[in-house]
Image (tube, rainbow, N blue to C red):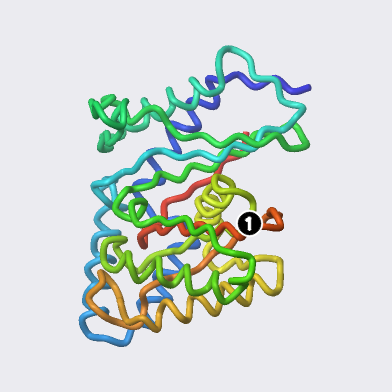
Amino acid sequence: MRDIDVSLVTQTVRDMCIDVNHELSPDMKEAFNAACAKEESELGKQIFRQLQQNLDIAKTDKIPICQDTGMAVFFVKVGQEVHFVGGDITEAINEGVRRGYTEGYLRKSVVGDPLIRKNTGDNTPAVIHYEIVPGDKVVITCAPKGFGSENMSRVFMLKPADGEEGVKVAVVQAVKDAGPNACPPMVVGVGIGGTFEKCAEMAKEALTRPVGQHSDIEYVKAMEEEILERINDTGIGPAGLGGRVTALAVNINTYATHIAGLPVAVNICCHVNRHIKATI
C-alpha cells in the first residue's frame, strides 16, 4: 500500500488548471499546424492565422487562450494500492481548482445551483470521474470544458437496426447543427454503447485521447476516419465561415450495450481542446 498526501493532489491540480489554459497540448499543436497547411479557402487561412496569433499571445504572456476557461472536468484513475492521507481526495481536487483559477486569474464560470445561478466565485465544484485501476499510482487528466462547444453536445438513443450508418449520420448531424457555435475547427468525441450516461462519459473522455491516435479497434478506426471526412465535406470551415477544415479529429470510444439499444453521444470541443495529464 502506498500513502499519498492529498496536498500533493491539490498542488498538482492547481498547476494543471493554469498550464492547460495557457498553451495547446503537443498533439493539438501538431493537429492545428497540419490543419493550417490543409485549409484551402482564403478566408479559412486568414482565420487560422488569427487563431495562431492568439495562441502565440497566450503562450508568451501567460494568459488564457480563451476567455471561457471552462468548467473543470477530471478523469482520475486511482491505483487500488493507493491510500490517500491528510484529507478528502474530492475536496483536495476542488481546492486545487480553487487555487488554480484564483491564482491563475482564470475566469470563474461556475454557478452553485443551475436555477438560482449564483456564481461560486472560484470555479468549483469540479466534475470528477473516478476509476479504480491496478497499481499504486494516480493518473489525473484535467480537461476544462468551455460551454460554447459543450452546449452543442447531443445524445442519440438509436435503434440497433440503425447500425453503423445510423451512427455516422447522427454524428455528422450533430456537427451540422452545431455549425459555427462550437468554434470550429473542432475535435469530436463520440461514445457508442453502454447506457444513456455511459455513452456521454465516453464521449467526453474521448476528447482527451491524443489527436491522431486512433482506436485500437479496426472498424472503429475506419469509422473515425470516414466521419472526419464527412464532417470536413460539410464546408462549415474555420469559425463556421466556410472552408475545408471543419474538424481536426473524430475520437470514438465504445462499450458493451443492451440488446435493445444503441446509445450514441457526441461531445464537441473547439480547436483548443484543452487536456493535460499528470501521474502521482
Residue kind at label 1, given as amino acid type: Gly
Query: Quick check: 23 above or below 173?
Result: above
* Quadrant where the N terminus is found in the figure: top right
Q: Nearer the viewer, residue 231 or 116?
A: 116
Judge left or right: residue 176 versus residue 215: left
Q: In the image, residue 255 lies at what x, y percent?
A: 68, 55
Residue 103 in sight here: no
- Can you tell which quarter of the image residue 54 is in? bottom left
**Regarding mark 1 in the picture, which secondary structure is present there?**
strand
Q: In the image, residue 109 lies at what x, y percent?
A: 27, 36
Give the number of marks.
Answer: 1
Q: Nearer the viewer, residue 153 or 49?
A: 153
Query: Quick check: 209 above or below 16?
Result: below
Query: Quick check: 200 above or below 50?
Result: above
Q: In the image, residue 46 lies at what x, y percent?
A: 21, 77
Farthest residue to the top: give it: 86
Residue at the spot of label 1: 193
Residue at image position (64%, 51%) is 194
* Quadrant where the C terminus is found in the figure: top right
Decide: few, some or many residues near mark 1? Use Cα within 10 Å; few <14, some 14-19, many ≥20: many
Residue at image position (30%, 76%) is 236
Residue 39 in sight here: yes
